[in-house]
Image (cartoon, helix red, strand yellow):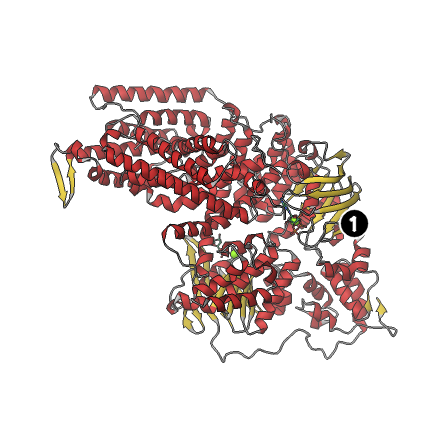
Amino acid sequence: MIEIKALTVKYTGRKRPVLRDLSLEVRKGETLLILGPSGSGKSSLALTLNGLIPHSIGEVLAGSVRVAGLDTQQHPVAELAQKAGILFQDPDAQFATLKVEDEVAFGLENLGVDPAVMDARIEQALAQVGMPAARRRAVAELSGGEKQRVALAALLAMQPELLVFDEPTANLDSMGTQQVFALLAQFKARGQHTLVLIEHKLDELMHLVDRVVVLDDEGRIFADGGPRELFDEHGEKLQRLGVWMPQVCVLAHALRARGVHMRPFPITLGETVKALEPALTGASSRNGQHPNRSGPAERGLEPPVFEVRDLSFNYGSLPALHGAALRVEAGDFLAIVGPNGAGKSTLAKHLIGLIKPPAGTVFFEGRDLNQIPPKLLASRAAYVFQNPEHQFVTEKVADEVAYGLRVTGMAEEEASSRSADLLEMFGLARYAKANPFTLSHGEKRRLSVAAMLAMDQGVLILDEPTFGQDERNAATLMSLLQALRAKGKTIVMITHDMRLVAEYATRVAVMLNGRVVFHGEPATMFAQTELMASARLNLPPLARLAALLSTRRPELSGCAKLEDFLHLEYRVAGRQGVEI
Amino acid sequence: MKNKPTAAWSTRDLLITIVIGLAFGVLLVPVTYVYGLMLAAGILARAVLSGVYFLPAAFAAYVVRKPGAILLVSVTSALVVLPFGYGFIVLVIGALTGLVGELVTWLFTRYVNFGLGRFVLAGAVGGVIEFLLILASLRTSQFDLGLVTLAVLVSALTFAICTAVAKYLADAVARTGVLANTALGKANADEI
Amino acid sequence: MRTIYFEGHSFLHRLNPLSKFSVSLLLFGFMLLTTDPWTPLAFCVLILALMVSLGGFSLRRLLAVLWPMLLFALVFFLLYPFLVRQSLVQDTPLLLELGPLRMYQGGLAYGLATSLRVLALLILSLPFSLTTDSADFIRSLVQQWRLPYRLGYSTLAAFRFVPMLRTELSVIGAAHRVRGVNGAHGLRGAAERMRRYAVPLLANAIRQAERTALAMDGRAFGASPQRTYFQRMRFSAADWVFIFGMLGLSALLLLGLNALGLLGPLAFLQIL
Ligand SMILES: Nc1ncnc2c1ncn2[C@@H]1O[C@H](COP(=O)(O)OP(=O)(O)OP(=O)(O)O)[C@@H](O)[C@H]1O
Ligand SMILES: Nc1ncnc2c1ncn2[C@@H]1O[C@H](COP(=O)(O)OP(=O)(O)OP(=O)(O)O)[C@@H](O)[C@H]1O
Ligand SMILES: [Mg+2]
Ligand SMILES: [Mg+2]
């Protein structure tokens, strides 16, 4: 289906090629997963498959790409579009028209298909993605997951044999992600298409993948093979490269380091359960203590950092908050979760006075927020917006950090030395002179946090800081936040990523319909299946594993961290660990 | 790589150009709050305003460097920016600004040479032409000559300033790297 | 187009967008020439009657759309008499004197005529803009008036960004506020402030535009000079009836006004 020979690709304006000497063959019907660190060229590789490279962007310096027998350099995109379709990451950036049926018809019209047969093809394509009733709906009013499904239908109408998915769930909440994954599974089961996936949320789709190709930072193929062998053999190297593996594979490697070998090497949840269950059955559970329960925190001595009492708010006539209440204690790492539109951002905006709360509803360190001058509040609490670029106000990275200091009237020298320190801490020192907009996603994010923290505020509020970011960037940011928390800062973070909640948060608040419906420890939340379902939250992979294994080991109930599994005792036969 | 202006429009060129118009339209909306009052306040205010509405045109001229881009940007930004944007007045005003922009850009830069002096001069001349056209559409006999002359000068000055500001903004946007695929990006292409 | 489109299935809704567009544009052009207050007033009434009878709009709904225009016209009416050149109206009776400001009857008449004309110019576009789906308009521009389809559909795709751009601008404002951005003064300050808002807004919009362009190219957009259309826009008998009906009615209206001696002289192009 795909035949790539010694391909080297470069973008205009770039010295270094994005893809180098890359060769790859994919058989018809195969499902290929492409992994690689951010900027390794995964998306670029996708663009070569339907001829957008070189016809619309970039240039092919050497080599060739054949898709379904067509040389992509010789054949126009119109012809290739009927062989290969790409579903992109941003659901909003791939529509050309305003209505669902027009959108699906768009490709057919471009191909010059006879209007008489279009109707049937539109019908069929929408049925294939499970949205037969949506024909006359406006694209703008669809949810993220529905948008991706319609975008896929628009590709399917052109009847491609190869479907490429370039991080289709990166901008979706958990429900949208589930919709897209379910669709992927259907397509795999139907077996009519060759699928190429670029994804970060691996645990949910490992059972679909036949083969994995890993790109390195230089745009070369680093590894290529079946998922099991690849994650088994190259696990460490992949982690060093910054490529993410399914969490169960990470777990398997961590256990292996402790002498517990699972055979066969598991790549799905089911396989892991099967492998671990027998090893857990016989073994005694160590002092029966919950591995992840820190002792009760000392509370109540100081006033809480934030206290929200019975806060309601409407945008015009549209209610966004409805009697929300919340306490944030000093030193918390609080995650606020909940479905789209639950009111998370609106609540956070009240905390920092971006929306002025009515008197008696929001308190900061015991004082009514209304009575705190904005300048004072800004020097105590920082707010980081979702898109880092929105907060940039200067043209140099160093100035960006120093800006917040200069507006407070700090002496020039002190400001620049302090900003240099911050850049060092956030790993940005070598970009001091660069334009903030030219940084990579992860660097931009870190810069925006560094810039906000210039005044050394004690509280940091972040609205979906990892949205659209890859896992490596997310992890770097999270460890930074943890370091800040260790220094005594309080962190409030809105997020959709349950894995981050599991690994990093000490407290979690669940919002639903403008209310805080749960506030407590993540483990408690994970253990409440009904709550999770009603707030449309998904358990992260390891939490699901823990839930499945908790019949054998009750102390695993609610666990979600890697560590939790490492502290367990496994039934070990033989001296140097077992194969289980 | 030496840049030659090409007349061919790719989908990307089209979308970028239109979006520039839309973004400026949204940016300039606050300006229009004063619009209604200023309109009544006489021709001097009008001279200043039409200069501000020339910003997107000058930006597009400098960035896209293709015949037609200025007209397209002016019309799209007018549709977004003007109050009652669904009326026809906006089309007329947008098209007028666009056509004047195309004319002076062609005259002074040939869509290739965008040195500051040359470009700003083009803007100033555009200001004079556009204002004379607007005057022709008003009952000029109502105003005395001194005021009209002053207004023409003001118009030339604001157009010149806005052209310079547009260039300043475009260079700032270019430094972010997003204009790499436009004529401006290619013109100062040092590969990174 | 900025859409204030109200979905519906009335006679007006079903017409070809171009017939509504042409009629509105013609009347608009004519309205630019009028100088008396009665002609615009008559046309305002005609158009509103058309919207109610053939467009299925209730007066209430129309009023909801109209009030900003009415307000605009009112402000215009109140200010104009003070701004018109005094020598033109000096010999008419003085109505009001507020310090240096004088309102003459002649000035009031000018104000009335001008504000009604402005109102009419705005109202004239309503039959088109309230009943036309912008996608249909572009479609018929492309299919009937031979607008290059790549231009038409690119415009349609790009206009979807407008709401996003609006929200983004307000988010940028808030984001700068929490950073304690303070406004510098003077021309440099203004340019600087403009840059702070414009750069993130444009950078994001342009990136998004590039992505959309790739997605469209990936679906064979612009691949061939010809394309087919799922929805064909047509000119039907109803369109001709509408066009000639409106022109006929307008002619009758003008004749009537003339007979009553209310039609003033026509003057070349006085936009406002
Ligand atoms: N249109 C473009 N013009 C110039 N350079 C580009 C363009 N698109 C991507 N690049 C550069 O090419 C490199 C590879 O980008 P690509 O998007 O293919 O990576 P990726 O593996 O998909 O990364 P991510 O995981 O962040 O999506 C990056 O350095 C990127 O900055
Ligand atoms: N500026 C606004 N104007 C009008 N309505 C708004 C505005 N911002 C948010 N809303 C609405 O208020 C409700 C709550 O929005 P909010 O942004 O707080 O939700 P959220 O939980 O942050 O959702 P998400 O996960 O999508 O970010 C939603 O229904 C949303 O559509
Ligand atoms: Mg990518
Ligand atoms: Mg939000």
Query: What is the number of callouts on the image?
Result: 1
Q: Position of residue A101 (x, y in %)?
A: 58, 36
Toward the viewer: C111 or B166? Answer: B166
Toward the viewer: C51 or C155? Answer: C155
Residue density around tag 1, few if under 14, some if 14–19, many if 20 or more, within 10 Å: some
Outermost residue toward the right in this view: A574
Q: Position of residue C76 (x, y in %)?
A: 26, 39
Residue at x-position 52% and y-position 62% = A401
Picture quadrant of residue C48: top left
Question: In this rendering, does residue A190 appear at all?
Answer: no
Q: Amino acid at mark 1?
A: Asp
Q: Chain of mark 1?
A: A
Q: Is residue C140 above or below residue B33?
A: above
The verdict on label 1 being within 8 Å of ligand 1 is: no
Toward the viewer: C34 or A76? Answer: A76
Q: Secondary structure at mark 1?
A: loop
Image quadrant containing the N terminus of chain A:
top right
Picture quadrant of residue A260: bottom right
Q: Position of residue C74 (x, y in %)?
A: 26, 40
Residue at x-position 48% and y-position 40% = B115
Q: Is residue C251 above or below residue A233?
A: above
Q: Which residue is disc 1 drawn over?
A: A210
Q: Is residue C79 left or right of residue C96?
A: right
Toward the viewer: A333 or A213? Answer: A213
Q: Is residue A537 left or right of residue A70?
A: left
Q: Is residue A419 left or right of residue B56?
A: right
Q: Position of residue B14 (x, y in %)?
A: 54, 35
Question: In this rendering, does residue C30 appear at all?
Answer: yes
Residue at x-position 56% and y-position 68% = A421
Image quadrant containing the C terminus of chain A:
bottom right
